[in-house]
């Protein structure tokens, strides 16, 4: 819901005819059973989710 509101607000930003503002995001969940993950692993996992989402939207 929050991401939809943010994306909706970004759609209202008008820079000019050829430029628009958009949002790309990835979400990664950390669970206690994955204690061996460090922050770089979590960022990489979220980044991979973002690129997968972008790929599916095209």
Image: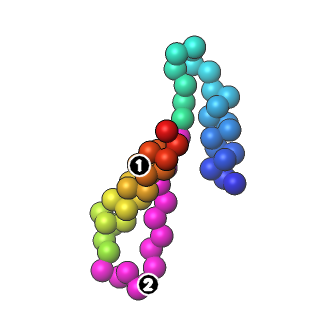
User: Which image quadrant: the N terminus?
Assistant: bottom right
> Farthest residue in the top direction?
17
Query: Magenta part of the protein: which range?
Result: 23-36
Q: Which mark is residue 51?
A: 1
In this image, 42 relative to 8: left or right? left
Tell me the element at label 2.
helix
The x, y position of residue 53, in whole percent, is 48, 50
Q: Quick check: can you spot residue 9?
A: yes
The x, y position of residue 57, in whole percent, is 52, 43
Q: Earlier in the sequence, mark 2 or mark 1?
A: 2
Which quadrant holds residue 36?
bottom left
- Up the image or down, 19 lies above or below 58; here it is above
Q: Is residue 28 magenta?
A: yes
The x, y position of residue 8, in whole percent, is 68, 38
Task: Tell me whether circle 2 and circle 1 mark residues in contact (CB < 8 Å).
Answer: no
Q: Residue visible at 64% across and 31% down?
A: 11
Look at discs 2 and 1 and give the one toward the viewer: 1
Q: Residue visible at 41% across and 85% down?
A: 33
Estimate how packed mark 1 is, as few (under 14), some (14 to 19) or many (20 or more) residues with alpha carbons within 10 Å.
Answer: some
Give the main secondary structure of the magenta stretch: loop
- Up the image or down, 13 lies above or below 22; here it is above
Q: Is residue 53 magenta?
A: no
Q: CA distance from mark 2 to mark 1?
A: 25 Å
**Residue at image mark 2:** 32
In this image, 16 relative to 45: left or right? right
Q: Residue visible at 49% across and 39% down?
A: 58
The x, y position of residue 56, in whole percent, is 49, 47
Tell me the element at label 1.
helix
């Amino acid at each position: 819901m929050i991401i939809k509101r943010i994306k909706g607000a970004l759609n209202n930003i008008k820079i000019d005819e050829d430029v628009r503002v958009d949002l790309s995001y990835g979400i990664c969940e950390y669970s206690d059973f994955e204690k061996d993950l460090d922050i770089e692993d979590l960022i990489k996992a979220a980044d991979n989710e973002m690129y997968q989402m972008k790929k599916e939207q095209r």
